């Protein structure tokens, strides 16, 4: 019997339905898994590599929403037979292998297991809530608040507590951080420089260190959301 794959934020009992993918897909860096407007037909599970979920704004600016890695599901769960199109892009940022699951097959199997279906729908709701909190921070607190929010999320996703602060084990360029905030690289450069002058953060070996997480939280009136809502994936 095939081993159940590890899937983030899904119960083990639900992952048994993901034992046998329809096929696997290998993509190189900078390839797209899907684009805005493509028809939704499958669910994808990242086995290796990294995928960035982005949304293009009407003025052509790219807004990064989620940064996904091994164990993360990608795609929209279809609960009806109505045709659905993707509202986002999924771009590979590190060569990836993905397991592909046909949604019509999954839906048929899950009809016999209400608990697993509910678990999958709760997962989808969690992803929507994560996106909503990111939009909230951008709208309520502007680009500075959006950057502070992203730094908090990065600390929850990739932070390692050490004596001098929280070290982020995943590196991001200033342009990548800017894309999460729907702003320019120059704006992020200035904001990060200000934080460094205040000793809120520093940088070592191209990795950020957060020395004063409470400063960032207080600046955006952090709601103390559950950590599961306050991550970058």
Image (cartoon, rainbow, N blue to C red):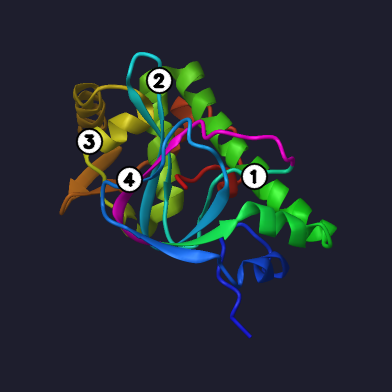
The first of marks 2 and 1 along the sequence is 2
13 shown above or below 146:
below
Task: Please provide the residue range marked out in magenta.
Answer: 80-97
Residue 211 circle label: 4
Mark 2 falls on what kind of element?
Answer: loop
The first of marks 1 and 3 along the sequence is 1
* Percent of width and height locating residue 23: 49, 66
| Real-space Cα separation, disc 4 to disc 1, in angstroms | 34 Å
- Comparing marks 1 and 3, which lies closer to the viewer? 1
Locate residue 116: give its quadrant.
Answer: bottom right
208 shown above or below 131:
below
Locate residue 117: give its quadrant.
Answer: bottom right
Mark 1 falls on what kind of element?
Answer: helix
Q: Residues within 10 Å of mark 2 (few under 14, many from 20)?
A: few
In depth, the one of 142 and 114 nearer the eye is 114
| Real-space Cα separation, disc 1 to disc 3, in angstroms | 29 Å
The first of marks 3 and 4 along the sequence is 3
* Disc 2 target residue: 57
Please, which residue is most extreme toward the bottom here?
1
* Disc 3 target residue: 174
* Disc 1 target residue: 124
Q: Residues within 10 Å of mark 3 (few under 14, many from 20)?
A: some
């Amino acid at each position: 019997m095939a081993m159940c794959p590890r899937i983030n934020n899904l119960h083990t009992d639900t992952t048994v339905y993901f034992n046998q993918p329809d096929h696997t897909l290998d993509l190189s860096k900078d390839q797209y898994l899907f684009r805005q407007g493509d028809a939704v037909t499958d669910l994808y599970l990242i086995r290796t590599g990294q995928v960035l979920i982005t949304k293009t704004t009407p003025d052509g600016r790219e807004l990064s929403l989620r940064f996904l890695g091994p164990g993360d599901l990608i795609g929209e769960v279809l609960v009806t037979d109505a045709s659905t199109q993707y509202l986002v892009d999924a771009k590979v940022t590190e060569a990836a292998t993905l397991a592909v699951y046909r949604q019509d097959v999954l839906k048929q199997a899950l009809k016999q297991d209400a608990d697993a279906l509910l678990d999958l729908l709760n997962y989808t709701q969690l992803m929507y809530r994560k996106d909503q909190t990111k939009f909230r921070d951008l709208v309520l607190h502007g680009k500075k608040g959006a950057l502070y929010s992203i730094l908090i999320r990065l600390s929850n996703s990739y932070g390692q507590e050490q004596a001098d602060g929280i070290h982020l084990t995943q590196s991001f360029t200033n342009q990548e951080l800017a894309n999460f905030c729907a702003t320019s690289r120059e704006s992020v450069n200035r904001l990060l420089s200000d934080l460094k002058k205040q000793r809120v953060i520093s940088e070592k070996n191209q990795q950020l260190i957060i020395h004063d997480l409470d400063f960032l939280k207080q600046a955006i009136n952090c709601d103390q959301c559950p950590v599961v809502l306050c991550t970058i994936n």
